[in-house]
Structures are given as C-alpha cells and as structure tokens.
Amino acid sequence: MMIGRILAIVVGVVCATGSAMAASMPALKSIDLAALQATVEGLAKELMLPGAMVLLKTPRGNLVFGYGTTELGATNPPRADTHFRAASNTKTMTAAVIVQLVQEGKLSFADLISKYVQRVPNGDEITIRQLITMRSGLPNFTNAPELAESLDKYPYRVWTADEVLGMAFKRPPDFAPGAEFEYNNTNYYLLGLVAEKIDGKPLSTIFRDRLFGPLGMKNTALPPSTSNAIPEPYSNGYLYGSTSYALADAPYPDDLQAAARAGTLKPNDDTWQNPSAYFAAGGVISTADDLATWMRALVGGKLFNADFQRQWLASPEAPEPGEPAMQKYGYGILTLTFGPNEIYYHEGEMPGYQSFMGYDPANDVTLVIWTNLTLALDGQATANTLMVKILDEIYTVSPLQEVK
C-alpha cells in the first residue's frame, strides 16, 4: 500500500426529500462525548490497536482521547503532544511551500521539472502543476519492491535522492504527462528538491522558517536524513508482517491473520526505520496538537495571500472527469464532500503509523487521528476507519467509507 493512500469514500445516497430535510437541519448533532469516546474505544479494540489518539474540536464539544499505549508492554497512554511519524500529511506542507514560491514569483506552475531537476523521464513535458496535482505519469517509488525489501533488511539505511528516484525512473512512465491522475510519492519528492533549489536551503529549514516557526508548531519537524530518532514523548509504531504490506497494498494472508488473532504473532516494531526515503512526500514528525494548528491555519488563510488562498481552496478536482465529486485532490490537499458538508483533509500511512487530519471551515470542525498500527488484519487503514465512525457520530449527514 502506498504511503498516504487516498481514501475510497462512498457517500450514502440521500433522496431529494432527505437532502432538503438535511439542508434545514443543523450540520452537527448534539455530541455525547462520553458515548463518542466509548465508540472510539470499542472500535480501537476491534482493530487490535496498541494505541490511538483522537483530537476533535467542534462548536458542540471537544474530545481529546488517548486510547491504549504508545508502546506494547507498557502503560503509556497517547497524548495530544505525543510525537509520531505523520507520513503523507507532509505533502500538505510541501505543497504549501510550492504555492508560496509561486506567490512570490520565484516559481510558476507552468515551469517544467527539467528546469530544476535533471534526468527526469518526460521532464521536458512534466509541469510543476502536474506534479502537485498527481498527474505526471511518473512511476511511484514506494511501489518498488526493492524499497520494502531494503527497509526490512536495513532499517537504518540513509537514502539519497539518486537512490530513491532511481527506483522510480528505471521503470517506464505509467501514462503521458497530464493524461490521468495517480497518487504518487515521486511527484512530491521532486517538489521538495525544487523547493530546496529555489530557496537554497534544506527542506527541513524551509519548513521551519516558512511554516512551523510562524505558526508556533514547536513539536513538528522534518528530521535530518541521518536521523531515525523521534523526540520525547513519542509513540512506537507497529505493523504486522513486512514493510511491503504498508507500501505495496499487499493483502494479509489467512495464516498471518489467524496467528495474529491467536496472539502467537506479534506486530513488528517499525519505529526506528529511517524515513529519509520519504523526504518531502512523507518524512515529517508531528503531534496531534500541531496538526490541528496546521490544518486550521492552512484552510483558514494564514499561509497565502487572499488570491492564492482562493486558488488553493479551489484546486481540488475529481481524479477523472465525470467521476462523482465526493472526493477530490488539489494542491497537496483532498476534499471530502458529504451532504452539505465539506472537509479539507489529508492522511498519512507508513510502516508503524496511520493518520488523518481534517478541517471543515463551514462548521469549524477539526479532527486529527493517529494510530500506531498501520493496518488492521482485514486490511483496513486504521485511522481512516476511526475517522469515518467519528464523522458518522457527529454529523447529521455523514459519509460511509469503504477502504479498498
């Protein structure tokens, strides 16, 4: 499974009369916080999660709930300031820097990637806009089986750009630039290199100076490529089986599921895998508190001027023309539309962790979830599963989710 796979969202069909009734009803239900916490706890047990963190802020009430433990064998409940690997939520940050550079006149969405990075297949045709909107056609390096194999054998390995991009570029393009949509980590790795070339600084410094520092996100950083450490307090991250299950969408075999349910197979601790391969596509470490701050700032207009904020908000498009508009991807951001409601969000997934962060500006709903088990035994992305249940509990009209 790729890091940060896009949710497959199926919205319940509402008849015309029902839609009219929903439009006249409050968007949010009255929230029984104790009951909601019990619901989260029950589902977390079903998913066999070691631990999970839920941070929900709404006008109807707030829930900050740490379930289970940050480390198997210990009793350390997750907290809102517990550090975890945020994986593809990093893409929202990389995209924000790119939009800022365009706003400053240092970059154009129409620029070709060959202007900044050499030897990219079809580099004289692929634009910055196609990279940021996932329409380049470049192969996804996290789909390369050799990446998962190497991470399993050499978890502390430090990856260079040539090594990471080489895994993608030795494979043929998936389609012509601009012809299709495909969620792809290679696109955002390249955008990180573009930002570094233009700003003349490491991406970690760019993130700190442009994003995290101004917003007061003191617990968020892109670590050095040589570091596999996480600041205290942190959560360990777990995954049943090899890294390939998290990166390549490989289903769990029946015997593995049976052994795990019987307790004879324990999940692997992938906390210390070096994240340098993910870089601008998924390398950031953060906390629930900081990601809540981030989403409210990003959607609320604190990163761009008014013109570019409008462009950013309008950037999400359906993956294919004519597809239902329930889910769209834009400049490093997704939107989920259900009934009259729309949430701007992203998710993150890597060996050891799965997470969701979203903000609904119309109803002032902020939701951040992270878990320290990437996948449930039935293949469900764990934080996503908690997310859809929580939205079902708090919204009058709610989404239904099917994770494929």
Image (cartoon, rainbow, N blue to C red):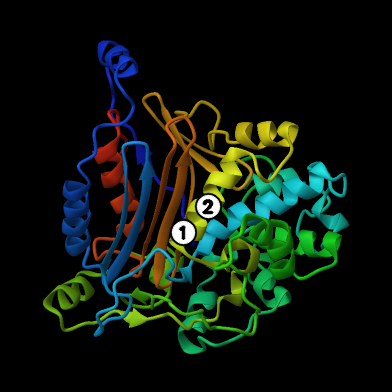
The quadrant in which residue 54 appears is: bottom left
Q: Is residue 299 left or right of residue 102?
A: left
| Image location of residue 381, percent across then percent down | 34, 58
| Image location of residue 260, percent across then percent down | 19, 76
Residue farthest toward the left in the current orientation of the protein: 262
Quadrant containing the N terminus in the rendered view? bottom left
Q: Contact (CB < 8 A) between labels 1 and 2?
A: yes
Foreground: 233 or 239? Answer: 233
Does the rendering let one see residue 307? yes
Q: Is residue 171 above or below residue 342?
A: below
The residue under the point 83% across, 49% down is 112
Q: Amino acid at mark 1?
A: Asp
Q: Could you give the CA–CA distance between mark 1 and mark 2, rounded to whole angstroms?
A: 6 Å
Q: Is residue 54 left or right of residue 185?
A: left
- Residue highlighted by disc 1: 289
- Residue highlighted by disc 2: 293
Q: Is residue 147 above or below residue 317?
A: below
